[in-house]
Image (spheres, grey):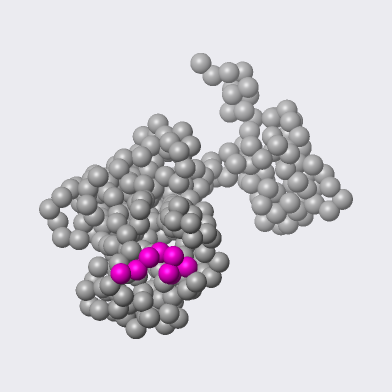
Amino acid sequence: MASPLSAQLVGRLRFRHLRLIDALARTGNLHRVAAEMHVTQPAATKILQDAETILGALLFERLPRGMALTEIGGFVADYAGRLLRETDSFAEGLGNLKAGGFGALSIGAIMATTPGLLPRAVAELKQRRPLMTIRLLAATSDILLDALSRNEIALAVGRFTDAKDALAFDMEPLAHEELWIFVARDHPLAARPFLTLAETAPMPWVLQPGSSPMRELIDRTFAEQGVGVLNNCVETTSIFATLHLVRDAGMIACLPKSILTDSVARGAFVRLPIDLSTQLRPLGIITRKGEKPSANAADFIDVLRSMSLPGADGRPAPV
């Protein structure tokens, strides 16, 4: 049964209130928000005051220059942003369906999926639902989980970055990914039959940012072997940039085997004879905890499951 406060919010809170709260949280400037909403500044002030009256709380501190969210305001602004994004997605999907399409699906994926699993899965989904619009966010797992928590994507193909992630998300494991440390074929270490991790430490590396699971694993491995922190490095989330820095700038890098297999086989890169003591957490399908996926998301999940089964070339080893 709905609480009295819930009934009050449903009866009085309007989208104009949510739009203003979301915009003001982003800008901190009521004049700019009024222009964005095509209303006068006094009208924008009235909308904000109405929202605070309905919610029974101060949402923004009035400062000499601009406005700042209160603790309750931050909570409300997060909700407003999520609801507005869901509404935009709903409106677009509804329009697509009315035009004879299959709606839209926003998904996220880490770079380990881009050479094989993801392109095949998207191609299969487009065969099943040719008029569906698919939006893809390619990023590291920490960025994907943040986007998933804000309802910007329906699901992610990635990894948990922390044990606490299991409190907010459901994970269905798909595969383990082996990591390779590699260099260009003309790198001084390329011809070495034996090599220790410590010997690579003084040389330049290109790595993912520190918040990513792969970088955390690399840093932990160096620490476990007493090497210390890698100081000579470039940080990027881009596979393209990583491969070019290895090839053209003589750097060392670490990427999933699925990305490197073809390039190593052609001789463009050389895998160094260094095995990491630990590997990444399983790759899997991540969704918001307890939330039933849409028909489009459920169809894509079904495709991912079928393509992660053993027996197909280029597929990652199943968990």
Using the image as rendered, state which of residue 86 and residue 43 is in the foreground: 86
Work out which residue is located at the far right of the displayed protein and give it.
64
State the residue in front, 272 or 32. 272
Q: Could you say where residue 218 lies in the image, as x and y percent from the top left? A: 44, 58
The quadrant in which residue 297 appears is top left
89 part of magenta stretch:
no
Residue that protrudes farthest toward the left in the picture: 311
Residue shown at 53% from the left, 70% from the top: 232
Q: In the image, residue 304 lies at what x, y percent?
A: 25, 49
Give the x, y percent position of residue 188: 38, 81
Q: Is residue 91 shown to the viewer in this render?
A: no
Q: Residue at x 43, y 69 (%)?
A: 200
Q: Residue at x 41, y 59 (%)?
A: 138
Q: Is residue 295 above or below residue 263?
A: above
Q: Is residue 187 above or below residue 54?
A: below
Magenta-colored span:
194-201
**Near-viewer residue (97 or 256):** 256
Q: Is residue 200 magenta?
A: yes
Q: Do we see residue 52 in this rendering?
A: yes
Screen quadrant of the C terminus: top left
